[in-house]
Amino acid sequence: MGVLLGRGRKTNRYKKKKKSPEQAMAPCDRKRLLSRDMAMDLGTANTLIYLKGEGVVLHEPSVVAYDTKSMEVLAVGEEAKSYLGRTPFNIKVVRPMANGAIEDFEITQVMIRELMGRVQKMGKFIKPKAVVCVPAGITQVEEQAVVKAAAEAGIGRLFLIEEPIAAAIGAGLDIDKNRGQMVVNIGGGVTDIAVLTLSSVAYSKTIRLGGDTMTRALMEHLLERHSMQVGENSAERCKIAAGSAAPVGGLAPYTVSGKDAVTSIPRVLLLNPDEVREAIQEPLQQIVGAVKEALEQTPPELVTDIAEDGIHLTGGGAMLRGLGMVIEKQTSIRCNLAEDPLTTVVKGTGKALENIKFYKKVFV
């Protein structure tokens, strides 16, 4: 892959990797060329794409690696994420999305174009219609950045949908009901909390932290308590393997590798699950506190509905073991974890794409 970045440079010069005959003759290629409309969950941690008539066809980390000298993009997605902590001085690995907003417009544009190009043909005369989900607390400037990035990447007509509404649709909730429903969508960089009724948001709160915040908290804990530096990927694996929000059975100690912050020699540390849980408590309690605040700000009738139906948890961060137990204990309301939390938002965005007329009132 070769994409050049920078003012005055072309951003569509892709050097496509040679495909095998099997890939070139894939039976779905012709179908995908015709099924151009798509839905996208453009997240801080991951980008997911849903193709109309096919479902979720792509799930890649929102990461880009590029050469700072030539300004050439070297990798996007999973491959770029594997570069984290392993690059020479001239190669930079970045997440162009930060806290649910576009931080680097040009790199985001290249990332969107590259990932879209993996699922269907893009070109001057092929401009698909798209539905893209955005955080509920998105500003007008952030909204315009999404619109511009999508247009520059080759999208024709664009619709925006707020993440909590997309999450509710993806979780199978009837958002048309005159009844309060609470959705807590915990992504990589943003947690959206919303109370929905009559296809509208009655209350929403967005806090700029999520699963990635917990990973960084674990890295900081290891540095402060053990004088040990670990990479982001290593810390994330540790969080997934041994992390929890409350004491749960069946978790084994996890061996994490890094280097001594003082001597710089390699170190290996066996972490008890209790310590991992302790390390991520601060961002975790901020999320729980935001849920409690949402209930405080919600009218009594809607809270009564929520108490009967439960709080719906979606997003990758919602998969943290014991999270529902902690929220239930502090709110006295049961929690319902979506069937597939990682894909709930993009599936809801996809449903909105499949029936744009029906969902037109929920678009931003």
Image (cartoon, rainbow, N blue to C red):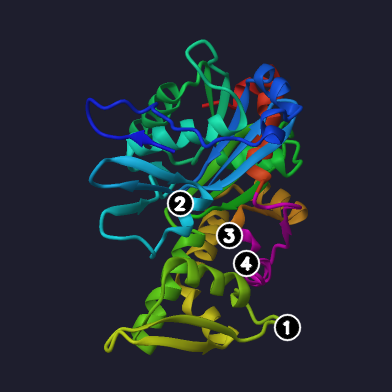
Residue 70: image location, x then y, percent? 25, 41
In this figure, which residue is indicated by the disc labeled 2? 80
**Any magenta on residue 235?**
no
Please give left or right for residue 354 compared with residue 222 in the image. Answer: right
Badge 4: residue crowd in 10 Å (few <14, some 14–19, many ≥20): some
In the displayed structure, 249 sits above or below 330; it is: below
> Which badge, 1 or 3, is on the more N-terminal residue?
1
- Label 2, secondary structure: give it: helix
- Label 3, secondary structure: give it: helix
Q: Which amino acid type is marked by label 3?
A: Gly
The structure residue drawn at horizontal position 63% and vertical position 49%, both measured from the top left corner, is 183
In the displayed structure, 86 sits above or below 22; it is: below
> Which badge, 1 or 2, is on the more N-terminal residue?
2
In this figure, which residue is indicated by the disc labeled 1? 249
Q: Which amino acid type is marked by label 2?
A: Ala
Would residue 109 be seen by someone viewing this image from the given angle? Answer: yes
Residue 53: image location, x then y, percent? 75, 26
Mark number displayed over residue 320: 4
